[in-house]
Image (tube, rainbow, N blue to C red):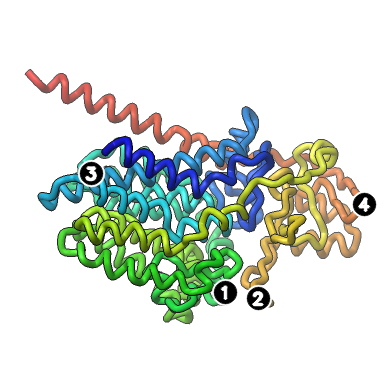
Amino acid sequence: MVAALAAWAVLLVGLLTWPLLRPGQLAARDMLVLDHPALTAAALGFGDLAARNVPQDGLLALVGTLLPASWFARVVIVVASAGAAAGAAWLTAVVRRRAGSPVTALPIAAAMTVAVWNPFAVERLLQGHWSLVVAAWLLPAIAAAGLTGRPLPQGLLIFAASLTPTGGLFAAATAVVTARGRHRLSALAVGVACCLPWVVPGLLAGAGATTSSAASVAAFAPRAEEHAGTLGALLGLGGIWNAAAVPASRTVGFALAGVLLFVVLLLSARRCPPVLLVLAAAGLSGAIAVWLLPGAVGWLVETVPGAGLLRDGQKLVALALPAYVALAGLARPIPAGLIVVLAILQVPDAPKAVQQIAPVHVAVDEGLVEFADGRDVFFPGRSGLSTRADGMVVVDPFTKALSVVQSGELVVDGVRVDAPSPRYEAAQRAWAKRDVEALAELGVGVVVDGERVVETGAPARGLPAAGVALLAWWLAVPLMLAGLWALRSRNLARSIP
């Protein structure tokens, strides 16, 4: 049984991640991982924009000093997808034993399929949200660790899932809900510790820097998929806002398989741990609320600091993944076989679709990088986006290779959902007047306007001490967990006569 399940897991993981073996660097929509990204204030969460990619960017910059960071990211993606399969097997064993059922191969295979091969993972990979997918893939294992009272594995999994704010929050929520008794407090403490690298910069930036526009809620609202509608798409863990990130199969009706899958999964609901159902209900309800109540959610993200994390409401369905996996693992033989078929039918063309995230050649002017020498660089009129040779819009490579004055302006379907950052607008005004002194006062060391390169005399600002300390803190979390666990084990050993 073990060999057959391992082979099935390898097949699932291989079919979803095979394009990552190609040479090049990762550049697809919101994903940009250079081989050697710069360690900048922005990478530490203290740049011109909100700390949305922290501590991920700081970690990649550190890794890039030792080895190609793009290959490191690929390894993380593959390992996390394998972790989804392993976590599904673990969670299945846990819930079946709790239900008094034997642990057999077919339900485990069904749970593995739901965990690895689902629309959320595929659509978010196509959008470039690789670290969010990593977090979602780890949620079943986090739930299994919580249900079995294993705080150390759970803490380490929370750490691994906390590359970005949303991943950290989802991991912490799953851990706290599933942990038993006194372990809930430790799960919460680990979650808070892992989120500090982006929480602290947000608090220091003030409310105005951590809120979003109400228009962004409509722009990032869940969308309907063919024959399933918006509700059906969400129940099937799909419905991402960007139609370009949706596999072709889901535009011709295959999303309907997700609705049928949801119905089949409900057959096991009576035996599923209630905490998982509560977590799933919270995630699905949140996503549905963003769809049905855009006005209320718009007010929330515009008023409450940090609530902008909710504007892309579809991602909340990731919280349902542990329950879906458990429900699949609790299924009887015939429903379990049907679950495997329906899960694959939701995204039958996933292996073809993921070719969009295959590594590509990314051109960066190394001469400019060397010339800038750590100074802040301002590109007038540049939005922070670039276009690949095939026409796909991607993140501007210079935003990762240099310390750039970032605009952050975002226009979706002709609607401006994010305004430019104050420093970028100030730099634009100063450059329009050719006021080099004003640019220097803004901390801009170099201006690159087309072929023209101008130095202002401003030196490199250096890295913020708080950002460096927070990244070091985050990196130390697993060591602290291991140390506390060793200390606890030693004390327990001493207490035994």
Q: Which residue is mark 3?
A: 183
Callout 2 crowding tier (Cα within 10 Å): few <14, some 14–19, many ≥20? few
| Mark 3: amino acid | His
User: Cα distance, mark 3 to mark 4?
Assistant: 59 Å
Q: Would you say residue 285 is visible in this rendering?
A: no
Position of the C terminus by quadrant: top left
| Mark 4: amino acid | Arg
Whether label 3 touches label 4, CB < 8 Å: no
User: Cα distance, mark 4 to mark 2?
Assistant: 32 Å
Q: Which residue is mark 1?
A: 219
Q: What numbered label is drawn on residue 413?
A: 2
Callout 4 crowding tier (Cα within 10 Å): few <14, some 14–19, many ≥20? few
Q: Element type at marker 1?
A: helix
| Mark 2: amino acid | Asp
Position of residue 74 relative to residue 345, above or below, is above
Q: Is residue 1 left or right of residue 21?
A: left
Task: Please state which of residues 352 and 100 is positioned toward the viewer in this rendering.
Answer: 352
Residue 446: x and y, percent? 83, 47
Residue 75: x and y, percent? 52, 37
Mark earlier in primary sequence (3, 4): 3
Q: Which residue is mark 4?
A: 452
Q: Is residue 341 left or right of residue 313?
A: left
Q: What numbered label is drawn on residue 255?
A: none
Question: Disc 4 vs disc 2: which is toward the camera?
Answer: 2
Q: Element type at marker 2?
A: loop
Task: Please state which of residues 180 and 373 is positioned toward the viewer in this rendering.
Answer: 180
Residue 22: x and y, percent? 64, 41
The residue at the point 77 percent across, 62 percent down is 426
